[in-house]
Every structure is written in structure tokens, then in C-alpha cells.
Image: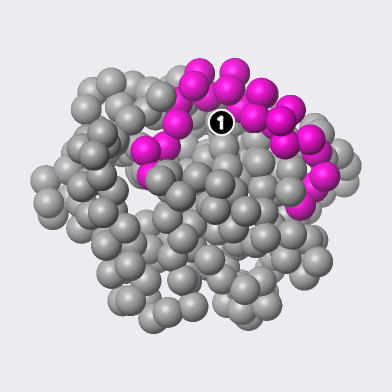
Amino acid sequence: MFLVFEGVDGAGKSTQIERFCDSLAAAGHELMRCREPGSTALGERLRELLLNHGETPIGMRAEMLIYMAARAQLVEEVIAPALAAGKTVVSDRFLLSSVVYQGHAGGLPIDEIRAVGAVATSGVRPDLTFLLDLHPDDAVRRAGDTPDRIESRGGPFFRKVRDGFLSEAAADPDRVAVIDAAQSVEDVQQSIMNAFQRHLGTPGHPHGSTT
């Protein structure tokens, strides 16, 4: 089973992924946890390039392709082998982030991003994505004092990010569960577990799907 957490930066993904993984491990799941970009040697090098402030300019199309390169390595080296071994994979971001950040907010054609994404992921799709929805103003207040290169793009960009996530969720409600991240940490955790249990009970998806 392949599960993904998405949302604007500052929505609380790290905290909820930790709690969710603890719950799944206690229930007997054999887990593989990963993050984008990262979780491979190549991915971590590309993460530094993408997120650190530096003197190298990165255009939006190049940014998308760099994310895709990190994603391709992650699928080949980590995600696909783990799924083949029967593990439950939990990822901090996946292809939807590129659709939203470089597409809805960045202005690249979404159909082109999906086409490149199909190659990068070899067709691997999350069974369920938890979208932690939070107003960008609230997310900024939660964020740290040292925003990375993406986080520094400001309010208008992140309002487009949030709208993009919600638009994509509305178009695919069976695979994207919208979670109100303005709730308490405990209530967000419960909402995530409720969405997960509903997905497990959906006809045709008793164990999830990766294609």
C-alpha cells in the first residue's frame, strides 16, 4: 500500500506522518517511510540544490524536471522495491506536489507535468493521499524563521498552491482525502485515521492499488 501526505509548507505534515506511522507500526504494518525530494543519495543532493538559497538560478521548468529526477530515483530505488516486498510505503509528498507547485502555482501546463510524471514514476500511483489543508497565512505563522527557496515565494504563490491542491482533490475524491489541518494535532490525527479506515473499506480497494 502506498500512502502520501501533501499540503502547503507549515501544514503539519511531519508531525502527522510520525504519528500515522507509529499507529500503522503498532497495527503490524511493515513500513517504508520516505520524503520528496530525498531518501536516496541522488535525491538528497538534489534536495540541497532545490531548497537551499544559492546563486544558481532555477527556472520553473528546470525545477519541475529536477524534482522529477529525484522522484524517478526514489521510485526505482525505494518505493517500487518496498511495494513489491509487501511493505506499506508512507511518503512526504509525491507527484501531486509537482502538479500543484510547478503547475497550478508555477504556471507550467499541467498535462505536460503529468506526462513527465508518468515516465518518472513508471506509473506508480498512491492508493491514498492525505491533503492537510491549511490557509497559507496560518501556515506562514507556523513555519520557521528560515524559509527555504520554495517557502520564500510569498503569500500569492501559496494561495495558488492551496487552491491547486483543493482543485485536484475535488477532481479525485476517491484517492485524495482533504484533512482540516487547522484542528488540534490530536483531531487532525483522528481525521487521518478515519479517512484511512474509510479507504480500506471502499469496494475494490481492500488492500490499495499502485497503478
| Residue 67 location, quadrant | top right
Q: Nearer the viewer, residue 72 or 147?
A: 72
Who's the residue at 26% across and 36% down the image? 205
* Label 1 Cα crowd, 10 Å radius (few <14 / some 14-19 / many 20+): many
Assign a secondary structure to mark 1.
helix
Residue 82 sits above or below residue 52 on the image? above
User: What's drawn in magenta, residue-wise?
Assistant: 105-128
Residue 211 sits above or below residue 201 on the image? above
**Residue on which the image places disc 1:** 71
Who's the residue at 12% across and 51% down the image? 27
Q: Nearer the viewer, residue 60 or 33?
A: 60
Q: Does the magenta portion include 118?
A: yes
x then y, percent, for residue 25: 18, 50
Who's the residue at 28% across and 21% down the image? 84
Q: Does the magenta portion include 72?
A: no
Under mark 1, the amino acid is Arg
- Point out the image quarter for the C terminus: top left
Question: Residue reaching furthest front?
Answer: 203
Answer yes or no: is residue 92 visible. no
Residue 192 sits above or below residue 140 on the image? above
Tag count = 1
Give the colouring mode of the picture: one colour
Q: Nearer the viewer, residue 119 or 203?
A: 203
Residue 84 sits above or below residue 208 on the image? above
Left or right, 18 with respect to 121, comes to left
Answer yes or no: is residue 76 visible. yes
x then y, percent, for residue 125: 45, 31
x then y, percent, for residue 140: 66, 74
x then y, percent, for residue 197: 23, 54
Who's the residue at 68% across and 77% down the image? 137
Left or right, 162 with respect to 36, comes to right
- Point out the image quarter for the N terminus: top left
